[in-house]
Image (cartoon, rainbow, N blue to C red):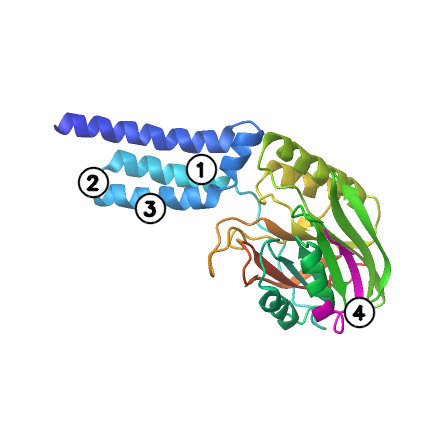
Amino acid sequence: MKHRRKMRELWLAMGLLTVAVVAAFAPDDYLPMLFRAFLLPTAAAMACCALLAVVRKAYWAGLAAGFSAALLLSQMGAAPAPEIRPANGSALRVFHMNVLQPNRSFDQAIAQALQSNADVLSVQEVDPRWADALARKLGSRYPYVHLEPRSNCYGIALFSRLPFTAVRTVIMGGSPFIEALLEVDHRPVRLWAVHATSPTSYGHYRRRNEQLAELAEQVGCGDTATIVVGDLNAVPWDRAYRRFCASSGLRSTTPAGQRTWPAMGPLALIPLDHVLLSPGLAHVSLRTVPIPGSDHRGLLAELAFVPHVH
């Protein structure tokens, strides 16, 4: 009986190590990407297994689970760009929310946006009904509007208190992204509001990667201070996300604790929504916010120019 128990423990240890090694070192492809998206909850589960195994005196299994948790966490990459504390406070306040197209909690979600007191609002999954509700209830506070409603969950909108110097819709991989130029503290700022394709199939995975590559090319061709905000449908340790940051020159502000999807009350599992900044900008603060009726948590970012960088 003792021998059989030991063999089961060894098989369990081997299974845990196999899961961790596959997650860490599998090629950059569709199924490994899906698995790696959940590295953080998987690592947490491994840590719980390690504690449980030690309590039960299954030390080999505990050692394997602990090593697996550490290996998974090591794949999550570098820390995000640090916050700054500028003398004059934030220069721009940005609020982002994916409202979930079938969601009909119009008033509550829009009240959350108004409560943010943001200078710029980025809204995603905007269908015609959402576009109408947003325009009616936000128009008096946010007179500068660019709407691109769609009925396929990829409609998008941008509302601003600050005038647009220029604004346009750019179609990437069949989805509308919005590029706007603003003047903040007498300096030009370019803001991209984006919603990349959800990688729910191999074809959609490739389309998302192509969108991120094209966006990186667009973002990288200029020296204007740049913000990208939206649902990129990628976690920060996704290799496509890392390639996007490297090619565009943008810095991620996303800590591992900034989980936004799927939202379950105050909790969520993985960080799909992001604010990325060019080197001339930094975040003063960044936090997630509940969006009534949505499967995403929103983001509220206070941004500032880096001192002595123009």
Mark 4 and mark 1 in contact? Answer it, CB < 8 Å: no
Disc 4 element:
loop
Q: Amino acid at mark 3?
A: Cys
Q: Amino acid at mark 4?
A: Pro
Point out the stretch of residues depicted in magenta: 136-149
Q: Which residue is mark 2?
A: 57
Report, in whole angstroms, how far the alpha carbon at label 4 lies from the one at label 1: 50 Å
First-in-chain label (2 vs 1): 2
Report, in whole angstroms, how far the alpha carbon at label 2 lies from the one at label 1: 22 Å
Q: Position of residue 183 (x, y in %)?
A: 84, 64
Q: Amino acid at mark 1?
A: Leu
Report, in whole angstroms, how far the alpha carbon at label 2 lies from the one at label 4: 65 Å
| 147 in the magenta segment | yes
The image quarter containing residue 216 is top right
The image quarter containing residue 107 is bottom right
Disc 3 crowd, CA 10 A, few/some/many (<14, 14-19, 20+): some
Report, in whole angstroms, how far the alpha carbon at label 1 lies from the one at label 3: 15 Å
Q: Position of residue 187 (x, y in %)?
A: 84, 63
| Left or right relative to 145: residue 125 | left
Q: Position of residue 28 (x, y in %)?
A: 58, 29
First-in-chain label (1 vs 3): 3
Report, in whole angstroms, how far the alpha carbon at label 3 lies from the one at label 2: 14 Å
Q: Which residue is mark 1?
A: 71
Mark 3 and mark 2 in contact? Answer it, CB < 8 Å: no
Disc 1 crowd, CA 10 A, few/some/many (<14, 14-19, 20+): some
Disc assigned to residue 48: 3
Q: Which residue is mark 4?
A: 143
Report, in whole angstroms, how far the alpha carbon at label 4 lies from the one at label 3: 51 Å
The answer to whether residue 67 shows anywhere in this view is yes
